[in-house]
Amino acid sequence: MVKLVIDAGHGGKDSGAVGATGLNEKVPNLKIALRCGEILSSQGISVEYTRTEDKYITLTERANIANNYNADYFISIHNNSFSDSSASGTETYAYKSGGEGETMARAILNSVVSAIGTKNRGVKYANFAVLRQTLMPATLVEICFISNPDEEARLKDDGFIETVSLAIAKGFLSFIGQDYQEPAPQEPETPDSQEPQAPEPGNRQELLKNYQEALEAFRRLQEKLNQLGELLK
Ligand SMILES: [Zn+2]
């Protein structure tokens, strides 16, 4: 079973970047991390989190959680910020080029950009502690710019959170070569769904025909038995 640690960036006293209308980056980071983990768990991935609530943890603690869990992969969820509020788009990070971390970063980047239609800012490389101290391939995702008012507004929307979470999950699955399995459709809950159903008109005619054929066969068998009975007298 593939083991993945998902890291919701920031938390507790560390709010992360703050949007134009005051959205704290730590909030959408956690929502997306948890939902993405839920989706991947439903796909058979063994998921662990660095945090599941609004609490502060250091970068080294985050890496240690992944290392102690013996995770195969590590994904850190963040949102970007820049002094110029017109900056926008999605980028992902790997520790260095050429490794599995980069391949994973690219798969997630492409999946997210095509799902939410943001500007593709590419895969970048950075000496981030969570990428450096984790012993497994690791990627950091900067979904969009919380400093951009339009992108901040999207981050407040539950539908957007769902779309992004699914896109990250699908990007990860494509990276490990696993197909995404659509969840089974829910059974419609109609009040009389438990009642025995009358046969459909077409079905009923078919049943009647089968009944008549069986009856005819039974009559012929009975006739034959009578004839045999006569012979044995
Ligand atoms: Zn961040």
Image (spheres, rainbow, N blue to C red):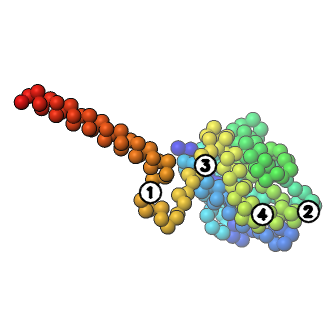
Q: Mark 1 points at which residue?
A: 198
Nearer-N-terminus badge (4/1) = 4
- Mark 2 lies on residue: 85
Q: From this viewpoint, which residue is outermost toward the left?
A: 233
Q: Name the residue under label 4.
A: 155
Residue 171 pos. (x, y %): 70, 45
Residue 146 appears in the rendering:
no
Task: Work out whether residue 36 or residue 75 is closer to the camera in this orientation and state it.
Answer: 36
Residue at x 21%, y 31% (from the top left corner): 224
Pointer 2: residues within 10 angstroms few (<14), some, or many (20+)? Answer: some
> Which circle's residue, 3 or 1, is located before the other in the chain?
3
Residue at image position (57%, 48%) is: 43
Q: Is the CB–ligand 1 distance for label 2 below 8 Å?
A: no
Q: How many marks?
A: 4
Which of the two marks, 4 or 1, is nearer to us in this view?
1
Mark 4 vs mark 1, CA separation in Å: 50 Å
Q: Which mark is residue 182?
A: 3
Q: What amino acid type is highlighted by mark number 4?
A: Leu
| Front label number (4 vs 2) | 4
Is residue 74 shown left or right of residue 207? Answer: right
Q: Are marks 3 and 4 in contact (CB under 8 Å)?
A: no
CA gap, disc 4 to disc 2? Answer: 15 Å
Q: What amino acid is at disc 2?
A: Ser
Q: Which of marks 4 and 2 is nearer the N terminus?
A: 2
Q: Which quarter of the rendered picture does the C terminus lie within?
A: top left
Q: Do the residues labelled 1 and 2 touch (CB within 8 Å)?
A: no
